[in-house]
């Protein structure tokens, strides 16, 4: 019975893997500028990039003397980039040594896209 449950879980994981990777990528590499207009006002949700709402942790409205102030809080991108790195086997479960490379947001996105393509080739 346990073996059947493990097999089923493995099958589900394999089927969901592309969606999990894509969602982690959307959250991990989402930039707050995707939600703002040229005057730094939050865009209506209908104008957000496809899938970008996955990166939103919280939206709050606060009444101030000058009107309503809307705050947008994004999810912790580091957690999702780390999860994505595990998907593409960049991070061992228990690393002995960790090497850190500082990259820009765009460089990180390009590197992970490159590694996913290399892994799937």
Image (cartoon, helix red, strand yellow):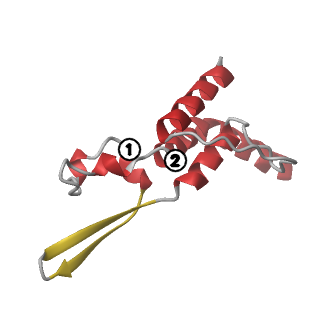
Residue 32, image x and y in percent?
36, 52
Q: Secondary structure at mark 1?
A: loop
> Which badge, 1 or 2, comes first in the chain's sequence?
2
38 or 91, nearer to the observer = 38
Query: Disc 1 and disc 2: Cα gap in Å?
Result: 12 Å
| Residue 112 to residue 35: above or below | above
Residue 1, image x and y in percent?
84, 52
Q: Circle 2 is placed at which residue position? A: 28
| C-beta proximity under 8 Å, tags 1 and 2 | no
Q: Circle 1 is placed at which residue position? A: 51
Using the rendered view, name the quadrant where residue 91 is placed: top right
Q: Could you classify mark 1 by the number of other residues whose Cα lies within 10 Å: few (under 14), some (14-19), or many (20 or more)? A: few
Residue 15, image x and y in percent?
61, 36
Indicate the quadrant containing the C terminus: top left, top right, bottom left or bottom right: top right
| Residue 113 to residue 4: above or below | above
| Residue 111 to residue 22: above or below | above
Q: Could you classify mark 2 by the number of other residues whose Cα lies within 10 Å: few (under 14), some (14-19), or many (20 or more)? A: many
Q: Secondary structure at mark 2?
A: helix
Taking the view exactly as shown, the residue that stands out farthest to the right is 96
């Amino acid at each position: 019975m346990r073996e059947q449950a493990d097999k089923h879980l493995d099958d589900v994981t394999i089927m969901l893997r592309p969606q999990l990777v894509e969602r982690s990528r959307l959250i991990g590499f989402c930039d707050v500028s995707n939600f703002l207009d040229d005057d730094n006002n939050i865009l209506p949700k209908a104008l957000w990039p496809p899938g970008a709402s996955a990166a939103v942790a919280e939206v709050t409205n606060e009444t101030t003397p000058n009107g309503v102030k809307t705050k947008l809080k994004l999810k912790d991108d580091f957690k999702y980039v780390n999860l994505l790195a595990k998907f593409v086997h960049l991070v061992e479960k228990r690393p002995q040594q960790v090497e850190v490379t500082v990259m820009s947001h765009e460089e990180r996105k390009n590197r992970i896209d490159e590694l996913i393509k290399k892994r799937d080739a």
